[in-house]
């Protein structure tokens, strides 16, 4: 059974039971955020996208994933953020940088995809699918083909961002599929890698 703990609303001071959410890892094992019993619940007064997620490691396979920070809705109208033990924000600088570029190019309503790609984080917008890989290994041919398939199913344009660059066969495949590839430098600035990316960011190409 999922863990259930008391949480006191910081606004009305009423105490309510909170059931810890359980998320499915890609391996199929359940992952639950460890709550901090000594932490203080806080009211969510405004949303900051890169603070909405917590990095959790699966105890079964060791895979690290990004999951929503646990929250509780109080009847008084306050949204209460429940403190997590050892929960650090995930690698969102790269994701925020990618989302900002897409927004600057005219793609509105950029948000996190409900289903994650095999590596990294997925973003979606109307007519667009983006994969952001903040890992330390170059994106592979499989990563590019996975993005292409996801975009094709959604009848959308696929765009890929990678902190560690791309393998030679991944670049070749992206060129053949006209998929824009970007790297993210130490300052999290997206850099166009191929002609498709340069065309994607050219003036007058916004949707």
Image (spheres, helix red, strand yellow):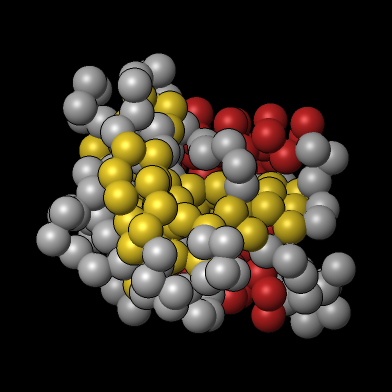
Task: Name which residue lies at 38% across and 46% down.
Answer: 17
Task: Name which residue lies at 68% across and 34% down.
Answer: 150
188 vs 160: above or below: below
Task: Name which residue lies at 56% across and 48% down.
Answer: 122
Task: Name which residue lies at 68% across and 53% down.
Answer: 124
Q: Residue furthest top?
A: 28
Tell me, yes or no, if residue 114 can be seen here. Answer: yes
Q: Position of residue 143 (x, y in %)?
A: 50, 35
- Which of 163/110 is in front? 110
Does residue 85 appear to the left or right of 161 in the view shown?
A: left
71 vs 62: above or below: below
192 vs 27: above or below: below
- Which of 198/113 is in front? 113
Q: Position of residue 160 (x, y in %)?
A: 56, 52
Q: Position of residue 84 (x, y in %)?
A: 25, 55
Quarter of the image holding residue 186? bottom left
Quarter of the image holding residue 54? bottom left
53 vs 103: above or below: above
Q: Position of residue 14 (x, y in %)?
A: 40, 64
**Which quarter of the rendering shows the C terminus?**
bottom right
Quarter of the image holding residue 90? bottom left
Does residue 43 appear to the left or right of 73 in the view shown?
A: left
Tell me, yes or no, if residue 97 can be seen here. Answer: no
């Amino acid at each position: 059974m999922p863990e259930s703990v008391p949480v006191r609303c910081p606004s009305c001071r009423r105490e309510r039971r909170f059931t810890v959410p359980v998320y499915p890892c890609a391996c199929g094992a359940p992952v639950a955020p460890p709550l901090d019993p000594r932490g203080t619940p806080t009211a969510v007064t405004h949303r900051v996208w890169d603070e909405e997620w917590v990095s959790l490691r699966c105890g079964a396979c060791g895979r690290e994933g990004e999951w929503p920070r646990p929250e509780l809705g109080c009847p008084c109208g306050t949204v209460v953020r429940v403190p997590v033990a050892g929960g650090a924000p995930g690698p969102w600088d790269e994701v925020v940088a990618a989302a900002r570029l897409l927004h600057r190019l005219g793609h509105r309503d950029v948000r996190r995809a409900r289903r994650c790609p095999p590596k990294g984080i997925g973003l979606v917008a109307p007519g667009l699918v983006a994969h952001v890989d903040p890992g330390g290994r170059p994106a592979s041919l499989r990563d590019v083909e996975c993005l292409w398939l996801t975009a094709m199913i959604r009848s959308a344009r696929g765009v890929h961002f990678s902190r560690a660059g791309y393998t030679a066969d991944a670049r070749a495949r992206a060129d053949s599929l006209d998929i824009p590839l970007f790297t993210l430098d130490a300052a999290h600035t997206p850099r166009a890698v191929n002609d498709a990316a340069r065309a994607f960011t050219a003036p007058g190409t916004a949707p």
